[in-house]
Structure formats: C-alpha cells, structure tokens
Amino acid sequence: TIVVVGSLNMDMVSTVDRMPAPGETVAGRGFAMVHGGKGANQAVAAARLGAVVRMVGCVGSDSFGGLLRQGLVAEGIDVAGVRECPGASGVAAITVDGSGGNSIVVYAGANALLLPGMIDAASIDSAAMVLVQLETPMATVVRLAEVCSAAGTPLMLDPAPAQALSVSLLRKTAWLTPNESEARTLLGVAEDLPMEEAAERLLALGVRNVMLKLGARGVYLAGADVASTLVPAPAVRAVDTTAAGDCFNAAFAVALTEGQAPVAAARFACAAAALSTTGAGAQPSMPTREAVLRMMRG
Ligand code: ADP
C-alpha cells in the first residue's frame, strides 16, 4: 500500500481573454471545476498507475467535500483516512488568460485542519511508502516523518509549495523531490545552481536521496540509494504542466514499491509525468499504467 498524506482541493478554473483589473468585471470564456490538491493528485496518479492507495486528509462540510471524497472513491482509493471537518473545503480559484498566464487564489480550508493526531501509526507501519507535500500543516508533516522514521517506512517529501525545512525533518526524508525553484528556496540561493551542486548541497542537509525535477529536461537523481544520474524527459507536446510534479512523485513511488531500481523507476515516472502534460487539468490528466507502458515502448 502507498499512503498519501496531504491536501484535497476543488480547482475552479475560469478562462478569460484578459485578466480583470481591480474593481473590474470581465466576461469569462469558459469554466471548469477540476479536482486537485497536491495530495489528492498524487493519490489519483498512483491509483491509475496500479497501486493500492490510502489517502489521509481533510475535506470540508460543504458540497465540495463530498465531491472530493467521491472522486477518490471512484479511483478505487481507500478514503477511510479522509475526515470531514466543519467549514469550507480547500479551494483554488484559478483564472487563465488568453496567453496562458494565470492568477490563482488558494484557500486551504479543511486542509489546514489536518492535525498531527490524525496520523495513524498502524497504517504507516504497514505502508510500502508514504508520500507527503506541504499544503497541510507543518506540524503534521513533522509528526508523519517521526512515525515513518520509527516504522522504517520510506517517506517521499515533495517540498511544495516551497518553504525552508528543518534539518530534523530532512534527516527523516528518504526521497526529497524539489523542482528548481523549490531547490533554491531550500538552499537559500537566488540563482539556480548546476544540478550536481544543488543535489550535493541538498544531500548535505541530511536527506537520503534527492530527485531534482527539471521540467522538460527530466530529473536528476542522487543519494545513498542511487548513482548520480540525469534521466531525460521524453519529448511531448505539453499543453498543461499542472500537476506534472505530482504525477512524477506518484509514478516513482509506484515503480519503486514494485521493486524497480531507482533509475528505472525514474524513467517510468518521467514517461508518466510527460504524458500528464499532454492533457488539461490536475487529476483528469493523470495517465493510466497502460498509457505509460505504451509510451515507454515508443
Ligand atoms: P513541478 O511540476 O513540480 O513544477 P517540473 O515542472 O519539473 O516540476 O515537472 C515535473 C516532472 O514532469 C519533470 O521532472 C518531468 O519529468 C515532467 N515534465 C514537466 N514538464 C515537462 C515537459 N514539458 N515535457 C516532458 N516532461 C515534462
């Protein structure tokens, strides 16, 4: 079982010709409600890629809460660890303009109510791997890392949205998966470092392994369980890279827990993430296992 601890959001995506100025109303061109949240995105991707998945998170008592939970159930995900909390669900109000630029308001809602006490040690003990991100309270992430460390269960930490992390948390992280801007935040540097140096400095903070996500260039792996390697991304016609990183993390976890070596798992994950950029929306664009295997056969 892969356990995903994290956020569930309803993304409300409007498309406009141009962004409204403060106080202005513009006519929208289109609208869609799409299930998102980094945690739920990773859970759905892992399930579509064939894993047994258990989600731990919080939804609100509003109408979105039921929809978000049902969305996971429809993917075959165990939602016994998804609590309903009083108040609003996590929401993201996203406006996309004619040139593909966007402006986004995220309200954490129920995601802010995922408390350390909701981490159930028994389900962590039996997990092959645990995935977490930073859209839920830091105290809960820290507690989760302690439980994983005590159980010997590998923790994959997606440091997104970017923030500085404590050394004690990093020391309990088996796989840290920043993109380039998150790596800059973690290292406190203003400019991108060469990938080898960025990885080396992140490892020096105490994480066991690093996967530096490099967008269309692929991913750079380094650490205790893998020789330093750049795995290139397959070339695709990307239309929407939303949640590509979430897809990558989930796919890597699926392949690794099936017993593949890290570099092979990263190749599978790059194929999955590349495919996810060819469709619109967060969870709708997550590929199936069959689609990924077809892409890898070429
Ligand atoms: P994030 O989505 O977290 O910002 P990236 O943009 O680096 O992180 O994307 C994560 C992964 O998704 C990359 O490491 C790569 O495997 C894949 N990916 C992202 N953009 C593209 C692209 N344009 N073409 C192919 N693969 C991509």
Image: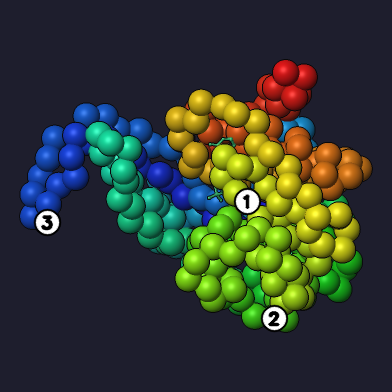
Q: Residue at x 46, y 35 (%)?
A: 240
Indicate the position of residue 120 as horizontal and vertical percent values: 75, 65
Circle 3: residue type: Pro
Q: Residue at x 82, y 62 (%)?
A: 223
Indicate the position of residue 279 as horizontal and vertical percent values: 50, 28
Indicate the position of residue 292 as horizontal and vertical percent values: 71, 26
Q: Nearer the viewer, residue 72 or 203?
A: 203
Q: Kindly report which numbered mark, 2 or 1, lies closer to the viewer in this rendering.
A: 1
For marks 2 and 1 on the same chain, the one whose residue lies earlier in the sequence:
2
Provide the residue designation for mark 1: 213
**Side of 153 relative to 96 (left or right):** right
Provide the residue designation for mark 3: 22
Provide the residue designation for mark 2: 167
For marks 3 and 2 on the same chain, the one whose residue lies earlier in the sequence:
3
Q: What secondary structure is found at the residue carrying circle 2?
A: helix
Q: What secondary structure is found at the residue carrying circle 1?
A: strand
Q: CA distance from mark 2 to mark 1?
A: 21 Å
